[in-house]
Amino acid sequence: MGDRRFGSAAIGALCVAAALTACSDSSSTSGDSAGGRAPAPAQAESNDLPRRAGAPQLLLPNLRSLPAEDVQIRRTGDGGRELRFGAVLANVGDGPLIVVPDVGGDCPPDQRHAAQSVIGDADGDQRYDTEIDTPAKTVPAGCMLDHPTHEHWHFDASASYVLTRPGRAARIAATDKVSFCLRDSRRLPGSRWPGASQRYDDCDRTSVQGITAGFADDYDVETPGQSLPLADGLPDGIYCLTLRADPANLLRETDDTDNAAVSAVRINGTQAAGAPPTACERSP
């Protein structure tokens, strides 16, 4: 049986272009227009980093998951079903996300500690200039997983995926920690980041990973891990698919409350279709 899918356009207009950086509250929260307000994390830890007297302000990234793309249902080898989708991590902040594998920290075997390098705004113009603005401090950022097939490290807990019913907290299916190799895959539309250029485009055992402000890292529907299982007997109906960047709040960014995007998905057998965004506006 062929796949049944709907593209990102069917979910609703994305909050991108110049308005992307202003999406908040009822207007949009990283994907409001694509399926409802994004729920705030249960706890949002403070990202205010202490600064020395006279030290420059910090140019922090701001990560957001954009609404799921190319959502579809596929049959699995055992005759079951899975919901598959593409995911996009966007950096809509003032500074780049920079993650460096190092030897510090306490990580499990076959993992490597991750450190986040935070840029200082040396000239105070609130824009990242690679020739002027340099790293001001390094902070712990969790662990990186060894990906032997790709021969590089994946940043652990880059995103989480959860499927729920509208207005209910109980999880139908979930993946709490999805690991990515962070890089600049797609430039965001809009004029907020003039002159921004791709800086992180490769991953190996020693490479610095990151997402430049004004860029996004995308993982298409064919990428392993871009799926959630659908239980046998799951009834047809409308469900809420929530994608959240940095679910464990491991990274320092300007705002931890806008990391998620919710899409309303109508499931009908082996078909997936967009549903009215209002269906998931009150999802927990």
Image (cartoon, grey):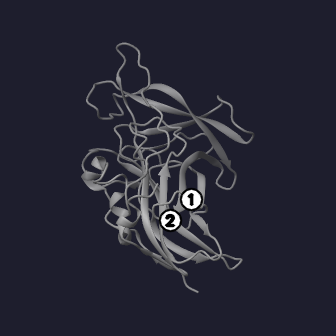
Residue lying furthest top in this view? 53
Figure check: 70 above or below 104: below
Q: Is residue 98 visible?
A: yes
Question: What percent of the width, then of the height, locates residue 12?
Answer: 34, 67
Q: Amino acid at mark 2?
A: Arg
Point 53% across, 38% down: residue = 250
Point 48% across, 38% down: residue = 98
Name the residue carrying label 2: 165
Q: Is residue 221 visible?
A: no
Name the residue carrying label 1: 170
Callout 1: SS? loop
Question: What percent of the width, then of the height, locates residue 153?
Answer: 62, 45
Point 51% across, 27% down: residue = 138
Q: Nearer the viewer, residue 239 or 46?
A: 239
Asked if the residue under mark 1 is in contact with the one under mark 2, i.e. CB atoms within 8 Å, the reply is: yes
The quadrant of the picture occupied by the N terminus is bottom right
Figure check: 219 above or below 102: below
- The reply, left or right, for residue 137 in relation to residue 110 is left
Question: What percent of the width, then of the height, locates residue 105?
Answer: 65, 29
Q: Amino acid at mark 1?
A: Ala
Q: Nearer the viewer, residue 193 or 60?
A: 60
Question: Around disc 2, counting alpha carbons within 10 Å, would you say few (fewer than 14), some (14 to 19), or many (20 or more)?
Answer: many
- The reply, left or right, for residue 150 in relation to residue 255 is right
